[in-house]
Amino acid sequence: MCYTFQDIMPRPAPKAPVRPPCQLSLFPETAALVRVDPAINCWRFYHLSLQPDLFGGTALVRQWGRIGTAGRQVCELHHDAGQARDALARQLRAKRRRGYRDRTAG
């Protein structure tokens, strides 16, 4: 029986793909808020997220409604990510003034 070099030497393990470095955002790109007040039967949620659109801009997607329902959704288009982040920050300030709080995991 004749052996070749490839049969004798073990093959090197395949290398894991290298992921490019990820830039962490200084500003929030998503937010989940809730407003719960059983005294007035208020059980509401509010979700905000930034998503890129097909034309190089950024969309601010707002979803709100009563907890347990699909709620309503609106998509606001912005020319760049900076304008969309400003709009998200304005919405967060307004909702927190109205009694919404960050949703906690527990």
Image (spheres, helix red, strand yellow):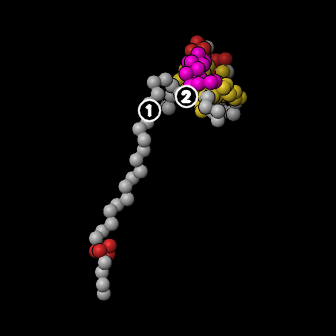
Q: Residue 68, position in %: x, y? A: 66, 33
Q: What residue does disc 1 label?
A: 23
Q: CA distance from mark 1 to mark 2?
A: 16 Å
Residue at image coords 58%, 12%:
97
Residue 96, compared with residue 68, is above or below; it is above
Q: Is residue 72 above or below residue 2?
A: above
Image x and y of residue 66, in percent: 68, 27
Neighbourhood count class around disc 2 (C-alpha, 10 Å): few under 14, some 14–19, many 20 upward: some
Q: Quadrant of residue 40?
A: top right
Which residue type carries mark 1?
Gln
In reply to whether residue 14 is colored magenta, the answer given is no
> Hey, which residue is sitting farthest right in the picture?
72
Tell me the residue that label 2 is attached to.
30
Q: Residue at x 31, y 78 (%)?
A: 4
Q: Amino acid at mark 2?
A: Thr
Give the residue displayed 57% in from the left and 15% down from the top: 93
Location of residue 99 with respect to 71 vertically, above or below: above
The residue segment tinted magenta is 78-91
Viewer-side residue, 2 vs 44: 2
Q: Position of residue 73 (x, y in %)?
A: 69, 29
Q: Is residue 34 visible?
A: no
Name the quadrant containing residue 57. top right
